[in-house]
Image: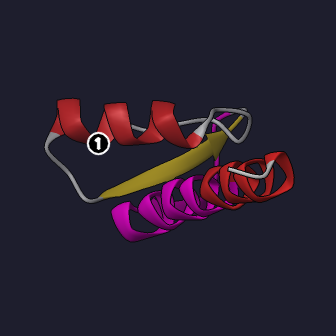
Amino acid sequence: VASCEPGETHVDGMRLMQQASCRHLPVVDQGHLVGFLSLRDLLQVEIDEKEDELRHINNYVHSAGY
């Protein structure tokens, strides 16, 4: 069973899910189950990051006077 540890990134989690062809990933800390991640959870993190990047780009463009 594929699993991840609490310190891994969302990109690592998505890669593991892709390799294992699964949509849910157990989170294991020192051999103990501490939670589950869904693909939806990880995709939301990705969307939030892209929205932040877009906001920064828009702020830069507007402040530069383009």
Residue at 78% over, 52% down = 65
40 inside magenta stretch: yes
Determine the residue located farthest toward the left in the rendered image: 21
Determine the residue located farthest toward the right in the rendered image: 63
Work out whether residue 1 can be spotted: no
Q: Is residue 17 left or right of residue 9?
A: left
Residue at 74% over, 34% down = 7
Whole-percent x, y for residue 46 in the image: 51, 54
7 inside magenta stretch: no
* Residue position for label 1: 17
Q: By what rule are the colours in the image chosen? A: secondary structure
From which residue to which does the magenta span run? 31-52
Q: Main secondary structure of the magenta part?
A: helix
Residue at 81% over, 45% down = 64
Work out whether residue 42 can be spotted: yes
Whole-percent x, y for residue 6 in the image: 71, 42
Whole-percent x, y for residue 9 in the image: 62, 35
For the N terminus, the quadrant is top left
Q: Is residue 7 left or right of residue 45?
A: right
Residue 19 falls in which quadrant of the image?
Answer: top left
Whole-percent x, y for residue 23 in the image: 25, 59
Q: Is residue 38 left or right of residue 46?
A: left
- The residue closer to the viewer here, 25 or 50, is 50
Q: Is residue 29 above or below residue 39?
A: above
Total label count? 1
Q: Residues within 10 Å of mark 1 (few under 14, many from 20)?
A: many
Q: Mark 1 belongs to which amino acid?
A: Met
- The residue closer to the viewer here, 13 or 46, is 46
Query: What secondary structure is marked by label 1?
Result: helix
